[in-house]
Amino acid sequence: MKINRHGRAKVLTQSEIQLIFSDGLENDRDRTLFAVCLFTACRIRECCTLFTQDIYTPKGNVRPRPSVRG
């Protein structure tokens, strides 16, 4: 059922986010996509265009800020 929010997205609560991770997403790929979008505020398309070097430095460390292209 679609709810009319007058152009505004719903802000998820911490318990709703935990429920999505524990029961809503079935595999690691989906959990990873959701997590990247949640913590970087990017869209699915932007997340799917990421390369390994956008997330990791040449030394293999996680970058403090991922490079997200639009």
Image (cartoon, helix red, strand yellow):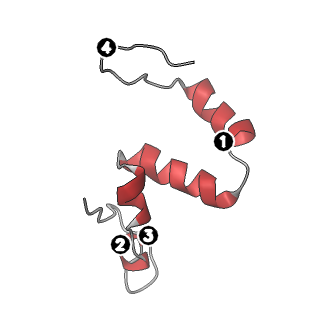
Name which of mark 3 and mark 1 comes first in the sequence. 1
Task: Identify the amino acid type marked 4.
Answer: His
Real-space Cα distance between discs 1 and 4?
27 Å
Q: Residue at x 67, y 59 (%)?
A: 28
Real-space Cα distance between discs 1 and 2?
24 Å
Task: Identify the amino acid type marked 2.
Answer: Asp
* Residue marked by disc 1: 21
Dot 1 alpha-carbon crowd within 10 angstroms: few under 14, some 14 to 19, many 20 or more: some
Task: Identify the amino acid type marked 3.
Answer: Val
Quarter of the image containing the C terminus?
A: bottom left
Name which of mark 1 and mark 2 comes first in the sequence. 1
Q: Secondary structure at mark 3?
A: loop
- In the rendered image, the residue lying farthest to the left is 70
* Left or right, 18 with reference to 63: right
Q: Nearer the viewer, mark 4 or mark 2?
A: 4
Q: Nearer the viewer, mark 3 or mark 2?
A: 2
Name which of mark 1 and mark 4 comes first in the sequence. 4
* Residue marked by disc 2: 54
Name which of mark 3 and mark 2 comes first in the sequence. 2
* Residue marked by disc 3: 62
Q: Secondary structure at mark 1?
A: helix
Up the image or down, 13 lies above or below 61; here it is above
